[in-house]
Amino acid sequence: MSFTPSNEISLSDQFLTIELQLSTQMKALRYNQHVAYIYDPVEYAYNLHAQFTRKFCQSAKKILFLGMNPGPWGMSQTGVPFGEVKVVRDWMRLSGEVGHPIKEHPSRPVLGLACHRSEISGRKFWGLFQELCKEPQHFFQHAFVYNYCPLAFLSSSGKNITPAEFKEMERRRLEKFDWLEMVTNGGADGSISDCNYMSSKSIGDQGGEGSGRDETSKRIEACRSLLKLRWHDDNRTCALTSQADERKLMNQICDEALCKIITLLQVQMIIGLGKFAEKRASLAIKEYQLDNIKVHKRVVSIPHPSPRNFMVKDWNQEATLQLIRLQIIDCFTPSSNST
């Protein structure tokens, strides 16, 4: 990573440049077949997003709260991380028009500040800091919020897909792949005859004691092994391996951008909202050898405020207790911020 903050360009504009570069790189990638819609609020909600950044990110930040990616009723609507509409409009006092993604799901329309749906994660997250800080400047004096991935991903049904779910989707696809169909018919385009050859070699002439089912099972396993290991077939990238490769590339791009943000803001502590964000931050810092944060000591997490996080019964209480344990609760109280 080659990045040195500029003294001639405002910190907020440098922040926005990193984000715009990141979103451009991310949109150039290919994503798995589950992703039917991609929303880029940094682009179509740039007006509000830039207002948010320029208003609240003008100086170094001790603490960076790290989310995964935009939610359909939060940042996808407002351009603000965890951007519950009422919080953005009434507490942060931001206003303006929001555009639309290139391809929009009919059940997930982008309405900007006119959206009446509530982002539960954002309502919980910002609700806690409204209670602690009273005014937004008391939160942003020491902290900022940033998403690891700038894009929102939706399935054809409109289901939100997070970056944390990509690896699991690849695993499921591998498990559900119709190996029997491939072995029996040679695949949809007949391109895996070498799988049949390899599997027949692995079975060999073992006599007639094994049943037809046993031979088929062995052939399937041989084909599975070959496809897992092979990266190319007749100059075409194998879908099962290319998806994993794209995911790794996505992580590399997001890791580098995150480390630029950490360097720019002179962050001393990263608080991942959930374990995925904590893990990615730790790996990124280790990869790019950032000296101002000690991995496993200054990269921590609080539970993700998502309603899908069924393990957390009282998010406000658990998050507050973690802030106390980290000895940073005073950073979010008006009395300490005024001194």
Image: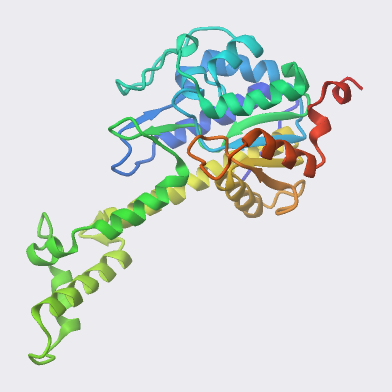
Question: Residue at horizontal 28%, vertical 42%?
Answer: 33
Which of the pair 333/261 is nearer the observer?
333
Q: Where in the figure is residue 245, as x and y percent of width and height?
A: 39, 53
Q: Please, is residue 325 above or below residue 234 in the view? A: above
Farthest right residue? 339
Residue 319 in the figure: left or right of residue 203: right
Q: Can residue 57 be seen at all in this image of the molecule?
A: no
Say which residue appears at 50% left-offset and 34% top-offset. 307
Depth check: 13 or 139 in front?
139
Quarter the N terminus occupies: top right
The single residue placed furthest to the front in the displayed view is 313
Is residue 119 among what the camera can see? yes
For residue 331, above or below residue 291? above
Task: Please identify the quarter of the rendering in which residue 175 is found.
Answer: bottom left
Residue visible at 53% across and 38% down in the picture: 68
Horizontal arrangement in the rendering, residue 167 relative to residue 14 (left or right): left
Whole-percent x, y for residue 152 in the image: 43, 31
Q: Nearer the viewer, residue 184 or 124?
A: 124
Residue 76 locus on image (x, y percent): 46, 23
Q: Is residue 180 left or right of residue 124?
A: left
Q: Quarter of the image holding residue 330?
A: top right
Up-down relation of residue 220 to residue 144 (above or below): below
The percent position of residue 327, horizontal first and vertical second, equals 82, 41
**Left or right: 296, with 166 as reference point:** right
Residue drawn at point x = 33 percent, y = 53 percent: 242
Quadrant containing the C terminus is: top right
